[in-house]
Image (spheres, coloured by chain):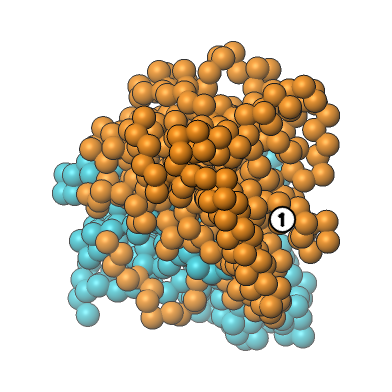
Chain colours: A cyan, B orange
Amino acid sequence: MTTRVIKYREGIQEALREEMIRDQSVFLIGEDIGTRGGSYKATDTLQDQFGEERILNAPISEAAIVGAALGAALAGARPVAEIMYIDFSGLAMDQIFNQCAKFHFMTGGSAIVPLVIRTQGGAGRGIAAHHSQSLEAWYSHIPGLKVVMPSTPYDVKGLLKASIRDDNPVFFIEHKLLYLSTGPVPEEEYIIPLGKADIKKEGDDVTIITYSKMVMDSLKAAEQLEKEGISAEVLDLRTLVPLDVEAIVESVGRTHKVVIVSEACKTGGFAGEIAMTIMEQAFDLLDAPIKRVTGLDTPIPYAFHLEAAVIPNPDWIIKAVKEVV
Amino acid sequence: MSFDKKKSIDLYRMMVRIRAFEEQCIQLSHKGLIGGSLHLYIGEEAIAAGSIDVLNADDYIASTHRGHGHCIAKEADMGRMFAELLGKETGYCKGRGGSMHIADVKLGMLGANGIVGAGIPIAVGAALAIKYRKGNQVVLCFFGDGATSTGAFHEGVNLGAAWRLPVIFICENNLYAITTPISKSCALRDVADRANGYGMPGVMVDGNDVLAVREAALKAVERARKGDGPTLIECKTYRWLGHHLGDDGKYRSPEEVQYWKDRDPIKTFSHRLLKEKIATEKGLKEIHGEVEKEIETAVKFAYDSPPANPERILEDVFYSIGNLSMGEKRI
């Protein structure tokens, strides 16, 4: 299998392009996704290829963007809606959590809702509290939504293709610091099924369970720990819903120690959900209490040094690992 | 106004059917067989009957929490509707939805909705899909006067108008959002005037006159099918009962309620049918008798159906995981 190196944002674009070629019912709707290509150029050049009919630049109307995607999905399309920043998703919240998520269930399974809501979150660009949040816990809490948070170009491409083909609403959260990151992808078409975690680095002494951009920080931490004689496994969940509990239990069964790393605030966050799942499913396999490394319970501040003070980094992860091994 | 005889009788029958369904709901509720809230359509029947009559079978509607009338006019099976209200496996939503969520996409019903205004962007989306695939269908989007104060109304209506989508916005202005009169929540006297602000025609009709509603809907639907975009139709009407069954409606004067009851869409239309010799007293009585039998049959179907099965409740949260039809090309 031949591979080539592409950027994360190119992985997104390739997935969208391939699926739009494959299936005429796929279209994109969002703010400034046309000639501007979105805030992070993920949809760059697509309008040149597919025209304004399939790459729909919408007014600043988040509720209408998601609602229109839902209505179109019910009427036979397979739309990909974009919410420019996850921080803006609150403006579309009713359509996301009451309408998209519940429609299939509320109709007794008769209606299907094949749509993707693409958005991006996370801190690190000095754009403060309305453009930097990690809100995945909100969406994971709503039955009926799948939640995907890819960390690499390979994963983002394969998971986005799977999300578009999925006949359920998928909340697809990219990370703004990953768009320019690079990695290998095969020349051939591939799809990554939702609900499958991936071991990004194997290890024996401790399992670092993480997702999205924190996979990169965890890998850096693991590299440093390796030099100090600690072998850390990095398990990338890739999708929070459905959650790959089997992969978590399997890894914990080998290392017996767990550090969970999430960029989001600690209180009510998904890290707590992972920890409790381990308590329920694998308590007997643990040799030490589970540790959480998370963002502080603050809004994301503006100044770079303040922002850095509230978001986990490899040093925090190393410290936590050393406390459990 | 054209006065096709068979059509007029059909419209009358539809209004009678909707009211009979609602009256049966009251009885079932009093027997303790229906849970939750019931938002009844009595007094507003002319709107659903008149407007949905101009649709083709493959056109869509988006409904509201007060949605039974829309479903019946879109030819939903009343047996399955009663079954839904009774929490039966044969209900439209297998007991998961209830009164406020009856939907059947195959019938073009994009759902009643528990959230005021939320159906508007969804209706616009269905219209977008129609335009996208260069189809000839239209969407009738129903909402109450209260919904016109929501952000979803503004965003949805604006998008529909800006993109000239084949959607018709039908405001059932029954003058109250629960207890708040529209005069206290909107500086305009007529909701139809809002259309100007979005660059589309606004039409006001007597919502208790089934032929007037039908004519306005017909014109708007023709316009939409031609690709000329949406129309906002305001139907002035009144709900005879409270916001939901059990609301005593004390925020409205008895004189006001009586004023509107005197404008009963069914009774006034029956007078007209008799006067124009389109129907006889005997003929109308027969319609009421036939509708009564339909209701009996529908209720019996619901009674005889098995209750929804709680052991299967997790099945419908997500669509068939691992189903082979995943990723089917859809248009």
Residue B49 vertical position relative to residue A73 in the rendered view, above or below: above
Instruction: Determine whether the residue tagged by mark 1 lies in a helix, strand or loop.
Output: helix
The C terminus of chain A, quarter of image: bottom right
Amino acid type assigned to the residue bearing label 1 in the image: Cys
Percent position of residue A100, x then y: 52, 54
Q: Callout 1: 10 Å neighbours few (<14), some, many (20+)? A: many
Q: Image quadrant of residue A279?
A: bottom right
Chain letter for the residue marked with disc 1 in the picture: B
Q: Is residue B285 left or right of residue B86?
A: left
Percent position of residue A257, x then y: 69, 77
Percent position of residue A117, x then y: 44, 52
Q: In this view, does A266 lie to the left or right of B215?
A: right
Looking at the picture, tell me which residue is in the foreground, B281 or B126.
B281
Percent position of residue A72, x then y: 38, 52
Q: Is residue A61 left or right of residue A322?
A: left
Residue B61 visible in this rendered orientation of the protein: no
Residue B322 visible in this rendered orientation of the protein: yes
Q: Image quadrant of residue B221?
A: top left
Q: Which residue lies furthest to the left in this view?
A: A49
Looking at the picture, tell me which residue is in the foreground, A131 or B194.
B194
Looking at the picture, tell me which residue is in the foreground, B47 or B150.
B47
Residue drawn at x 56%, y 27% is: B236
The N terminus of chain A, quarter of image: bottom left
Residue drawn at x 41%, y 68% is: A166
Residue drawn at x 30%, y 57% is: A26
Residue drawn at x 37%, y 63% is: A164
> What residue would you read off at disc 1?
B25
Residue A180 vertical position relative to residue B83 in the rendered view, above or below: above
